[in-house]
Image (cartoon, rainbow, N blue to C red):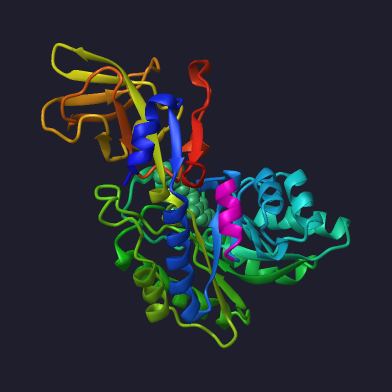
Amino acid sequence: MIPQNLIDKLPELKTPLYYYDMDLLQETLNAASNAAKPYGYHIHFALKANFNVKVLETISATGMGADCVSGNEIIKALQNGFHPRQIVFAGVGKSDEEIRLALEKNIYAFNCESLQEIEVINEIAGSVGKKARIFLRLNPDVKAHTHKNITTGTAETKFGISPLETELYLKQLDHFQHTELIGLHFHIGSQICDFSVFKALALKVNEIQDHFESNGVKIQHLNMGGGLGIDYKHPEKNPVPDFKGYFDTFNQHLKLRPGQEVHFELGRALVAQSGVLLSKVLYVKSGEKNRFAIVDASMTDLLRPALYEAYHKIENLSNNGNTGDILDVAGPVCESSDVFARNIALGTTQRGDFLAIYSTGAYGQVMSSAYNLRSPAHTLYSDEL
Ligand code: LLP
């Protein structure tokens, strides 16, 4: 997966280093677009997964839209080729300034997460003489069967409008004159590989649409969020996610009304497998119970293992894959959770070896921090090699 010319060049390069395979990115984007096309589905890339300029330029060039969760993401999307009419703005806590900015830039729609937020958007839109297009992000109470920290569509999470607030909204629709309800939005979680979860979501959305219609409210469009998972265990076998299976599931189970558009907000599935974090072994040490490879990347470069105990495949690129050492791979930060993997077979490993930590193109670089006053990782794109 890592080209030999990159492996040869590693001693000259600075690590930790995020390497992006731009051919794989393009192949993934093409697969997603081709799978969505027959159904006329619209894809918005969730910028929160990766906002590197080159990645954004590549994605916007395909004609996809953007899913933003802050004013800064809206600005970033606009600066990198995304059309304002293809930008959706989500998030439970949009500030007044961010709402003003989104109105001023004429984005496609706000995904609203509470009754009070709709009230504020209505007020601000009125004050600037505009009508805000809104989707209601509803909490459908559908289990995503994924990590609890990335589950967003069950009743106890902070996300989405509850059935109680939805009923209150329906009773006072006429009150929100400076907003136009153009659709319903859902996002139930991330890293979902079981398609029956998406089927359950589609069936729930059918019921919710019927309920709105029985209240005299016609739903123009649907936004089904993101969530499609990737194969962290075998990135080499499955570099491109099953977009066809994903969109087919919705096509089979969603009951669309005539003229209804369906939108999706994919993040991870579009970019994760294109990114690899490369790191150098600083020390190999023996503890009482385990042996450790201490590497120069840390949780400040890739937080997922520390935050979610997430698995990322790791390979030693310097030892030709021989068998040998069983090691924990840990970073330099002063936290016991700064560990990328425990008890893995890395082959004979020594100071100066280079490790590849795979599937890090999504929620990797974007979640970096400066904890311990560490420097940010370097970046290399395959077309610059
Ligand atoms: N739409 C909304 C409203 C979202 O909240 C998210 C992700 C997405 C779309 C994109 O979801 P995706 O297709 O990437 O699953 N940091 C975590 C993931 C957090 C996801 C947050 N929301 C991780 O590293 O696994």
- On the question of residue 160 being in view, the answer is no
Q: In the displayed structure, does residue 94 sit left or right of residue 314?
A: right
Question: In the rendered image, is residue 322 in sight?
Answer: yes
Q: Is residue 57 magenta?
A: yes
Q: Which residues are magenta?
A: 54-62
Instruction: Say left or right for 223 vs 82.
Output: left
- The residue positioned 45% from the left and 77% from the top of the image is 206
Residue 49 picture location, percent across and down: 50, 47
Say which of 92 and 20 sits in front: 20
Front position in the image: 153 or 375: 375
Q: Position of residue 380 (x, y in %)?
A: 49, 38
Horizontal arrangement in the rendering, residue 133 relative to residue 378 (left or right): right
- Residue 124 locus on image (x, y percent): 81, 54
Q: Is residue 383 on the magenta stretch?
A: no
Q: Position of residue 358 (x, y in %)?
A: 33, 41
Residue found 46% across the figure and 82% down from its top: 255
> In this view of the protein, which residue sits in the foreground, 203 or 21?
21
Q: Is residue 377 above or below residue 35?
A: above
Query: What number of labels is visible?
Result: 0
Q: Which residue does the image show at 34% across and 54% down from the upper left? A: 230
Which of the 4 image quarters holds residue 10? Answer: top left
